[in-house]
Image (spheres, rainbow, N blue to C red):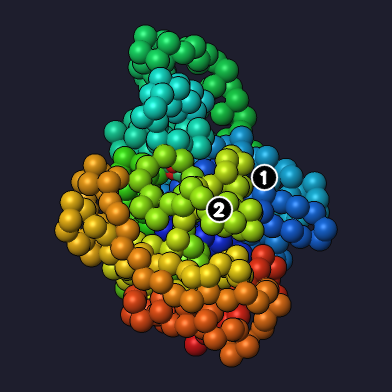
């Protein structure tokens, strides 16, 4: 397979980072296509701990190219911090190794200010955003008043765009959100300076991808967040502001759908969610606590404790449909050891009626009762198991249940955080 997309099937935090890191060894090019520094994963390299929010973890490999596509929203100060941090620890981030789409939109200081002030004003109805300015940045992109990274390389164009936009933003910040207005000169000067530093990385990523494909490169598209956070298909309005489904890789990087060979869905063996919004299988009891503590379920971007619950099969089936999944990876299976019985939600009940699909109405979705199927659990620690056949029988049955329920094969099983705690049944780049 030459082009593989990895997406999250739930509400993000499925452990995509580890699987991307594992498959990066087999890829030549790694591409981010949506989201921004609301995502993040921790990588250990050469005894140093790195938290990457924007740069793909392929950067640790000498010969790989890391691309940031047009669909990503970039906070240039965060990107530069990542570049500086990597460089200071001996990881090369040369232009040519890291490439950034000239069309990627920039997160501006007013986007962050608006995100934070809006959430504060919303009180109980807040989304629970990461406060990184993601939503307001995508709003401006769609509203055709966004500033692209390519724009700040042209002083006159940048001055004209910023002065027009900032007047409106300051009015909104001061008059509606009771927040402080921002200084034109400060933003203009700092973004120009950051633009100068980033200029050598900025290029046409779609052209680079076409070149790579023609040379037979293996390309890994790395999704951020998860299917239920998709702006169109997720639990709106409790979603992020980009298309997190696999189709987003095409418009977010500039490739056509016929160039994609495989879509891998990453699914945690249970469910977590961070931020507000409905979560039918959420557990607020000891089992929920077990999942949070054993699974280390705290956000890598904001440190917030994640809400935890049983695996939701309805959501998983939805991910199969929306992403056209060709395979599944089940992560954190080891966290379920010691829980018996296990429950998987197979449908919902709403006012006495059975629902097999997710309702579009958020009020209905918020008042669903999960219908569970119980499966026997296992007590054994499975974190050192290397082969599928060595897993406890009930553990194998849990995986078989997921395959039969979704109709999609499980190709990778993760039983712990390290790379060697992974059972790979089929590697998409080797078949
Ligand atoms: P935003 O993306 O910062 O606008 O946040 C919108 C919603 O998406 C909030 O509920 C966040 O907690 C959630 N979210 C954004 N990025 C991630 C992620 O990488 N993992 C899990 N949840 C996320």
> Farthest residue in the bottom direction?
389
Relative to 424, is 231 on the left or the right? left
Q: In the image, is residue 238 above or below residue 49?
A: above
Q: Between residue 129 and residue 211, name the one nearer to us.
A: 129
Relative to 209, is 359 on the left or the right? left
List x then y, in percent, for residue 176: 35, 13
Residue in the image at 27% along x and 59% along y: 348
Q: Between residue 181 and residue 277, name the one nearer to us.
A: 277
Residue in the image at 39% along x and 27% along y: 124
Q: What's the distance in space between the residues labelled 1 and 2, CA to CA?
A: 38 Å
Residue in the image at 35% along x and 66% along y: 372
Q: In the image, is residue 332 above or below residue 327?
A: above
List x then y, in percent, for residue 380: 65, 77
Q: Secondary structure at mark 1?
A: helix
Front tag of 1 and 2: 2
Relative to 334, is 86 on the left or the right? right
- Which residue in the protein does label 1 denote? 82
Q: Between residue 325 and residue 123, name the one nearer to us.
A: 123
Which dot marks residue 246?
Answer: none
List x then y, in percent, for residue 367: 27, 46
- Which residue in the protein does label 2 denote? 286
Q: In the image, is residue 244 above or below residue 174?
A: below
Is the residue at mark 2 in contact range of ligand 1, meaning its CB lies under 8 Å from it?
Answer: no
Q: In the image, is residue 239 above or below residue 140?
A: below
Mark 1 or 2, nearer chain start: 1
């Amino acid at each position: 397979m030459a082009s593989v997309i990895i997406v999250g099937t739930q509400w993000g935090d499925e452990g995509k980072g580890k699987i991307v890191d594992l498959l990066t060894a087999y890829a030549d090019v790694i591409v981010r296509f949506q989201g921004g520094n609301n995502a993040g994963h921790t990588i250990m390299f050469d005894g140093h701990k790195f938290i990457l929010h924007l740069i793909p973890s392929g950067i640790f490999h000498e010969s790989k190219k890391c691309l940031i596509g047009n669909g990503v929203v970039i906070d240039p100060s965060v990107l530069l911090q990542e570049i500086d941090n990597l460089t200071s620890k001996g990881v090369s981030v040369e232009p040519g190794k890291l490439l950034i789409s000239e069309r990627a939109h920039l997160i501006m200081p007013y986007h962050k200010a608006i995100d934070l002030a809006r959430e504060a004003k919303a009180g109980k109805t807040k989304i629970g955003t990461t406060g990184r300015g993601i939503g307001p940045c995508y709003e401006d992109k769609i509203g055709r008043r966004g500033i692209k990274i390519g724009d700040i390389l042209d002083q006159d164009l940048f001055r004209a765009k910023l002065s027009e936009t900032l007047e409106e933003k300051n009015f909104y910040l001061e008059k509606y959100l009771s927040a402080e207005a921002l200084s034109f000169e400060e933003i203009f000067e700092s973004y120009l300076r950051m633009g100068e530093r980033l200029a050598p990385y900025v290029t046409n990523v779609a052209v680079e991808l076409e070149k790579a494909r023609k040379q037979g490169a293996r390309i890994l598209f790395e999704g951020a967040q998860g299917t239920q956070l998709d702006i169109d298909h997720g639990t709106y309005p409790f979603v992020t502001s980009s298309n997190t489904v696999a189709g987003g890789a095409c418009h977010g990087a500039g490739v056509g759908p016929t160039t994609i060979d495989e879509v891998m869905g990453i699914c945690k063996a249970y469910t977590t969610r961070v931020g507000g919004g409905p979560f039918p299988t959420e557990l607020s009891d000891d089992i929920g606590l077990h999942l949070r503590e054993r699974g280390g379920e705290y956000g890598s971007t904001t440190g917030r404790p994640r809400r935890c619950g049983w695996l939701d099969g309805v959501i998983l089936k939805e991910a199969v449909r929306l992403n056209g999944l060709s395979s599944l990876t089940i992560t954190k299976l080891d966290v379920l050891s010691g829980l018996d019985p296990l429950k998987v939600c197979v449908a919902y009940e709403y006012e006495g009626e059975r629902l097999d699909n997710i309702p579009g109405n958020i009020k209905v979705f918020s008042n669903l009762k999960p219908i569970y199927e119980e499966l026997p659990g296992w007590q054994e620690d499975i974190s050192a198991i290397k082969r599928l056949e060595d897993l406890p029988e009930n553990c194998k049955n849990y995986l078989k249940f997921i395959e039969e329920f979704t109709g999609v094969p499980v190709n990778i099983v993760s039983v712990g955080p390290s790379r060697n705690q992974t059972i790979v049944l089929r590697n998409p780049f080797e078949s």
